[in-house]
Amino acid sequence: MRQSPLVVVANRLPIDDSVAPDGACEWRRSPGGLVSALHPLLRHTPATWVGWAGGTGPAPHLPEVDGVRMHTVPLTAEDLRDHYEGFANATLWPLYHDAVEQPEYHRRWWEAYQRVNQRFAEAAAEVAEPGALIWVQDYHLQLVPGLLRALRPDLRIGFFLHVPFPPPELFMQLPRRAELLRGMLGADLIGFQRDQAAHNFAQLVAKVLDLPATDRRVCVDDRVVRVGAFPVSIDTAEMAALAARPEVADRARRLRRDLGDPEHVILSVDWMDYTKGIEQRLKAYSELLASGDVKVRDTVLVQVAVPSRERVGQYQILRDRVEREVGRINGEFGRVGEPAIHYLTQTFDRAELAALYRVADVMAVTPLRDGMNLVAKEYVAARVDDTGALLLSEFAGAATELSQAFLVNPHDLEGLKQELLSALRATPADVAARMRAMREHLHRNDIHAWASSYLSALDESGSLLTRFAGTD
């Protein structure tokens, strides 16, 4: 088996679930998320991606995609239920997102989480060349750094958490809190989206493990584990170039015409997830329609809600509630041929997504809690003419960087309504000034800057980083 100088370890492989008849695979590009962040880097890097292919049973052999080798980790039906749907997404996910939904704790879920993390660590150890850089991603695999260090102490191990890291009073609920912290501390460098998350981590390490810790470093035996904030970004130039294509601009014009050429188009693109604030957003919009501040013939809301974790009960209940509310709003306020909300539960390719971004006069990104939210950044990058208003939750990581957005507390219904109206009624000069400042920030802080910053910090000597052309 060939070994690689850079190994990315993530829960999912970045490919479509289906393979074409000729055996070809394609990158799975979803709204925001890990794949969109890493795809531009790995296209130009001699790397192996270790992850789950999406099914159960034996691990399939998959071809390279854009020169990146795919190494599949198998999951059984029990692993899928207890590790992925259980501990990762019914225990950690809600806890890390301010316990928006009540986390559940089951011993068999923790046993499955340990078992699967061990399998991922062994797979990474197998494909890593001596002294390689290993980049472990996200909350599904928090034990992997520690397990991997025990297997391969020669490796340079990084861990990056894409979701928020909770304050001590929430994290302390976890029955296995110490084991999770020790797993993360197997890394040489632990990256978070925001400084506050690094601070939370340092507090917990000191409290739970009684280790000397600051927001920048933790002393573990004879090692120093460095900690820092590395806000993830997008390929700004790629999205801007895509949005500027004539065919994308034409598609945007057709979409607006299909929507009835309204004065204002509001767009939201989310996973169907209780952290995204979809229900709060719909309620605010409904009240604006009821008060007459927004009229259907002048304004339309396009809500894209991509299905997520459909086998998890909380998500099935959420989808039912959202669809009932959309139906109620359309039934009460819509007209024949003029729905108040266009509701879509499908994924879009990059060109169609860019066209939607170009159509939207207001992009409403109002999660209750989010590690970063790359959709907000993609919208800004796509507004190549410096038009468009971004309505952004204060509790998205992107709010720290995109401070010129119309910032809102999504828990405050009146505030959400007023800020949405402010975005709709903003003058062209105000909108342009805000968008121009945000676009300039993104061009300076794109995906390449993020990857270079993180990998440079991980590879202190610089001996390996010089091989990775994509991070120059």
Image (cartoon, rainbow, N blue to C red):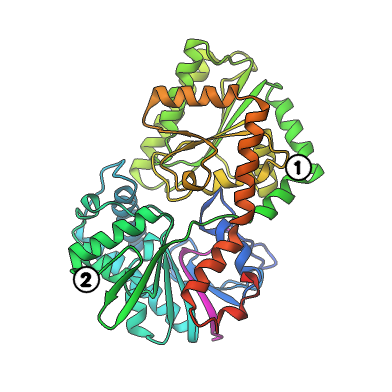
Q: Earlier in the sequence, mark 1 or mark 2?
A: 2
Q: Residue furthest right?
A: 246
**SS state under label 1:** helix
**Crowding at mark 2 (Cα within 10 Å: few <14, some 14-19, many 20+):** some
Q: Quadrant of residue 137?
A: bottom left
Q: Nearer the viewer, mark 1 or mark 2?
A: 2
Horizontal placement of 245 versus 223: left or right?
Answer: right
**Identity, as a three-letter code, of the amino acid under mark 1:** Val
Is residue 114 shown left or right of residue 357?
left
Q: Position of residue 358 (x, y in %)?
A: 69, 37
Q: Amino acid at mark 2?
A: Leu
Q: Position of residue 216 (x, y in %)?
A: 36, 66
Q: Residue at x 48, y 11 (%)?
A: 291
Query: Can you see residue 14?
Result: no
**Residue 283: x %, y % from top left:** 43, 23
Asked whether, in this view, residue 465 is left or right of residue 195, the answer is right
Q: 10 Å neighbourhood of mark 1: few (<14), some, or many (≥20)?
A: many
Q: Work out whether residue 37 can be spotted.
A: yes
Question: Magenta stretch containing residue 9, yes or no?
Answer: yes
Mark 1 touches mark 2? (CB < 8 Å) = no
Residue 275 at x, y = what percent?
39, 41
Residue denoted by label 2: 211
Q: Quadrant of the N terminus?
A: bottom right
The region drawn magenta spans 1-16
Location of residue 470 (image quadrant): bottom right
Q: Is residue 3 magenta?
A: yes
Which label belongs to residue 248? 1
